[in-house]
Image (tube, grey):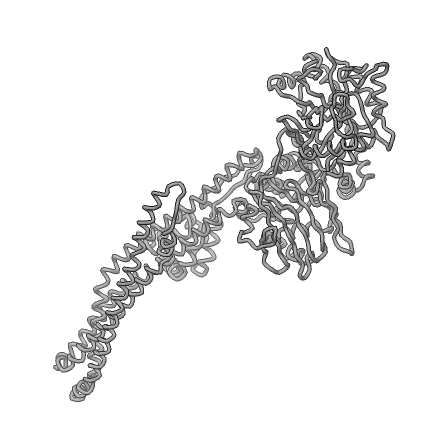
Amino acid sequence: MFERGTEWIRADFHLHTKADKEFKYSGEDNSFVSEYVQKLKEEKIGLGVITNHNKFDLGEYKALKKKANKEDIALFPGVELSVKEGANGIHCLIVFKETEWINGENENINQFLDEVFKGISNRENENTRCNLDLAHVIEELNSYDKGYFILMAHIEQRSGFLKECDGGLIESLAQKTYFKNSVLGFQKGRTRDKIKQLEQWMGYKLPYIEGSDCKSIDEIGKGDKKCYVKIGDSNFDSVALAFKDFKNRISLEKSTSSHGFIRSVEFLGGKLDGKKIYLSPELNCLIGIRGSGKSSIIEAIRYALDIPPSNSDNDYKREVVKNLLGSGGQVILELQDNYGNLYRIKRILGEDPHVTDMDDKGVGAKIGSILSAPLYFGQKDLSAMDNGFELTLLDKIVGEVSGNFETQISNIEERISSKMKGFINLENKINNGGELEKDLSDIKHKIKIFEEKGLSDKLSKQVNFQQDKATIDNVNTLVGKYIQALQNIISSEELSMLIKLEKSNSQEVPELFEKLRIEIKKVTSTKNKIEEIIQEVKDSKSKLVEFSNEMNNTITSLEEEFAEIKREIDIPNLNPDDFSALKLRETKIEEAIEKIDQQENEKNKLVVELNELVQERNDTLLKELEIYKNEINRINQSQTSLKLHITFKGDKKEFLTQLKDSFKGTSVSTSSYEQITGKFPDFTSLVIDILLKDSEKISQILPDTHLTKVKQRVREEYSSYLKHKTPNNITINYHGKPITNHSIGQRASALVLFILSQKNNNLIMIDQPEDDLDNQVIYNEIIKEIKSRKPDVQFIFATHNANIPVLGDSEQIISVSYDDEGITTDTGSIDSKLIQNKIVDIMEGGHEAFNRRTEIYNLWRN
């Protein structure tokens, strides 16, 4: 019980037993205890108070408690006392602190009952009232100087507090200090209007609890209403504390953790070899003196979750894990996801993490799918804030959603880069048109010389054969590419997926899916037709190869004839071989010039496609912005201390840095760079202006000498420049002032509040969040936020500050100490006496120092 610290358990504060006159039991006496406890177990009651009418039977109570302890059920001694108040008396459930009221075979409960019923016989009758009114009953109880508290029984029924007391009496009692200190709750409040009226008379609220008021074993746990109490130890003080903090610790509905969390962390090898630390789904605090190993455990959890350490003390944090685990050491996390499924994450030092189910079978899930967007901040991370830290922090919080956009944007940028390469190649070819015209003119001039010498006719046969061969070879090449294009179609991923979908079924619309399968089949059957076409084309290509071979053989057979013609030509400075080369070159250049118009059209088409891709990139960035805006709005609405604002592509400092790094050596001045950041939203728009729009905008900023260098650099490096992103700019105002204008401590306070306000993160883990924070901020803001958020988020803190575990009501506390033998741990909730002593010793300097400070504070206050 309480393995994971404080937990919610069902409580029954109004139990009767066989010792009560009203209780009916017909079974064997020696079976009563077993049957009674078994019924408690069946009803899943983990805490009960034995409250017989005006009576306490020590022997029976001890027997029940001993049996209940074996079933992890906590029983407390009590009594249902009929007090002389109101028309019919009121029934009060008094819960006694066992360690003070019972000592072995001696107890003071019956002594108290004897006092209040002095001179009254038949006191065990439920309607028999004691001699004293409520004020004097409390006075009598206080005279024993022992722990107790009172719950008003069945308040709306006969002998109930609300039924028997009028408004004036309730108002009077509620103002008394003795009443406030002793009466901690009401049982069986049912009517909304009556409860509202009671609270108005009282002037303050008390919790409503439940008890079965059982008159037999079968009635234990009866009724639709149940009550739950959150405790971390089965002692009286734990329950009393729950009533003092009833808004957080008492509920009429069962509270369960629906979010993912780490259930335990276990170590094999290293300084924590064999240790298994159980964690609460709510607030966990690691405490210990400096150097005790708190940070080591935090860093080991980080390592198991495969969260990279931040840049602050990166090497130190890696070394901490290495020293803790040692060679071959392993850390094992047990986790629960948002749906209640259980997993393990195992990681050996130096190896990748391995995700398994609870049977140690590997599963394909990512860690982020099991534990949603865990946040980690190590020592000094919150105070080491550089430019852009706000966006980095928000990125951690938004988690995988923003990562999906990064992938989309990266894909778009690759497509822009690819099309830009095609655009530049086309532009080079088009720009080369003038040179081609000059080359063609020069070649025609040289050919004319051959013609003037009468050589054209003699050499034309060879030239014609060479041109025919080139034509056949070109056809052969084009047909080969056509076959490849057809093969790409039938091997496409889309066609493969359609073939898999041929057997699609639907339970909801089977008729529609039958029609769907028919149409899919029509589409996929085209694969056979295309395969037939490919075979036909391949047959034709075989013929083309034959034609090519035939042409080669023909040319070979004519080689002597061509050679004889060349030998007959004896003109100085004219090589007959040049003529055929010139004629082939002439044909190729003429074809290239003819293509320029087509290339111009292709270029214009690419411009349109590039502009569309740039717009698609911006649209994707805007979708990403919406994710951030929604998160920012949620943060702004969840608290009043912080206000965040985001500006699209607003981080001009980062853009300026990118420009300076990219254009070093171009002699561009700082003022010109600043003008560029004002003129262009990001690097992509600058690249588009230079390459697609003939430097329309940037030419207004840079002189020609600088512009030429920048254009050349962009033409060479556009692919890397397109990947530069101007980040969104996030500003954080803390209490109405920009966070950057605050001190380091105030900034750290704002960041901790920022982190604690998150709802989409299953885990928030911070090593010493109190560093750079003052105690006033911790109490006034941080603690309140932690208590508000911990039902929905698992917190793991390493801390030296007692305010966090104590005022934060930490569900699980791990006390860590280090000696030559290794690291030792003690775990328990804030309710555990052992842990309470550890807190005083470690965080307050020991009991003497704590008591001395308390004494001094009291003197100051007085």
Task: Say above or below: 597 vs 160.
Answer: below
Q: Nearer the viewer, residue 520 or 387?
A: 520
Residue 83 percent location from the top left of the image? 77, 16
Classify the position of the N terminus by image quarter. Answer: top right
* Front-lying residue, 449 or 847: 847
Q: Position of residue 472 (x, y in %)?
A: 22, 73
Q: Residue at x 19, y 87 (%)?
A: 560
Task: Name the image quarter holding residue 106.
Answer: top right
Observer-nearest of 269 and 822: 269
Whether residue 571 can be seen here? no
Q: Can residue 589 be seen in the rendering of this structure?
A: yes
Query: Image point 62% across, 40% down: which residue?
Result: 749
Across and down, in percent, residue 146 comes to 82, 27
Q: In the rendered image of this protein, does residue 798 appear above or below residue 424?
A: above
Residue found at the far top of this picture: 87
Counting the numbered discs, the total is 0
Give the quarter of the figure containing the C terminus.
top right
Q: In screen coordinates, is 202 left or right of 94?
A: left
Q: Is residue 453 left or right of residue 413?
A: left
Residue 446 in the image, given as x and y percentages of width and height: 19, 77
**Left or right: where 664 falls relative to 132:** left
